[in-house]
Amino acid sequence: MQLNTKYFLWIICLVAGTYSHAQQTVDQLMKIRPISIVEHPTNSEENVIFLPMEFSSSKFIKPPKKIIVPEGKEVVTVHLVYTKYRQVDTFNQPMLNRKRFENLQALFPEVFDMKQVEWRVLEQRKAKTEGDARKMYHGFIIFLREPPSEEKLSAEKWLINRILLNFHDSIIDVPERTLYRKRKRRVETGLYIPRNSRKAAKGIRYNSRSIWFREPEMTTVIDSIPRKKIKGYKKRVGVFNGGILANTNEFDALLAKKMTGKWIVVTDVTASMAPYSAQVLAYIKFNEDLRKNGHFSFFNDGNGAPHMLKRIGASGGIYTCKYNEFDSIYNTLVTAMQNGDGGDIPENNIEAILSSIQKWPDADSILMIADAKAPIKDMMLLKFVKKPVSVVLCGNVNGDIPNDYLNLVRTTGGSIIQTDDEIRDIKKLKVGDTFDCGDRVYKLTDKGILRIE
């Protein structure tokens, strides 16, 4: 799929051209800036309600007597969709939109009082004739979702709070150590292989070469050779005694990163990221310089919206911190986490980066806290990222670097931050190159960076 600059500008407008507030009025909704799109999708989905209208009309086509939100669902987004095509130059689109909002209010007044409903006005530009325009969708599209249960919300918040309350940093002594590299060697076993292939296949071996000049049997042995010596040093690490965290790898990786200049910390808070999000919060809490010079945003890939609403570059669910006090950062993260869990596995990482850069264009670099098991679904937007992105991969047990994140840091000139070290200068690596990171050895392959030792 080709993505041009005009499409990207539409994405930025889509983020800006929305409105969400309790007790909306028609006057407030009329202030929403229309978003220009080619054509709105009209896929049939379980959590989507269509309220169609005729072209140039404010009347609903076969409207229901009453809009009833199914039990266990809530409205997350409302779209007003129309076409840009005009029959006459004097046609007043804003007046028609006002009448459409008023008719929706008469049919479904409850939605105007619902909290956290996102309203969008979308202007389709595909139609070039009146006939084309009449074939396109006009009217409202209401998107529903299953809100997270109170039990789940309480459990996630409890988990984060318990980790924060039981978390502290400490200084430990790391002793001097020698790192070894494994080496494979072929050596003789002292036995000889029969010349007769059937005997050899049966495992028959002889103690001498004999007059038959038998070939010596070979085997592979693995031994270790010293690779490098690391002097002892003092290291700042996270300490948690609450019995929840298996390790503090993410916190320790963040501590290992020397952050100078202005940074944006962009954090994935979808699905099972709560233990890692708590470590991010702990790191921010203990890092006054970062709070002073940094910015913070959190994303959940669409606030739990239906898949049809998750357009590349416009999935939403991105929450930016207005203030840098820890309480504000904490509340923003919890809100983002509780408003959506991602749903599908691929996440809108690049959209979150671009949205954050748009809000804070003076930032020097991006630090992304990402789920190692979640692919990036909007890699096609990567060419618009013009700042270096460094990545901490959460839950990266085996140390392999997935290809999406490798491409992200290679393209932007960023790095991969590990617990003991940082993989830098990835742009210079070629497929087949091996390199050290901490006490591990990695190899660059066409599938990503793989740990080989």
Image: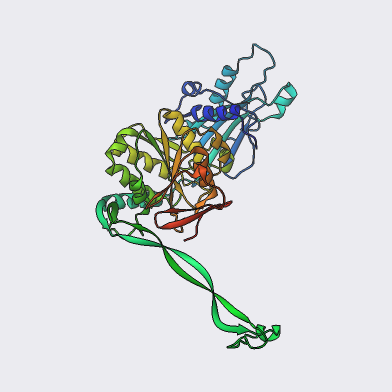
Count of marks overlaid on the render: 0
Pinpoint residue 172: horizontal percent, then vertical percent: 25, 55
The furthest residue to the front: 211
Residue closest to the eye, 442 or 121: 442
Q: Is residue 247 left or right of residue 401?
A: left
Whether residue 347 can be seen here: no
What kind of colouring is applied to the model shown? rainbow
Residue at screen point 43% across, 67% down: 224
Q: Is residue 10 above or below residue 164?
A: above
Q: Is residue 86 left or right of residue 319?
A: right
| Quadrant of the rendered image containing residue 239 | bottom left
Q: Is residue 127 above or below residue 173?
A: above
Pinpoint residue 318: horizontal percent, then vertical percent: 45, 37
The furthest residue to the right: 131
Residue at screen point 53% across, 48% down: 375
Query: Quadrant where the N terminus lies?
Result: top right
Pinpoint residue 141: horizontal percent, then vertical percent: 58, 34
The furthest residue to the top: 90
| Quadrant of the rendered image containing residue 24 | top left
Residue closest to the eye, 33 or 92: 33
Residue at screen point 54% across, 35% down: 314
| Quadrant of the rendered image containing residue 95 | top right
Whether residue 158 can be seen here: yes
Pinpoint residue 63: horizontal percent, then vertical percent: 62, 33
Residue closest to the eye, 423 or 241: 423
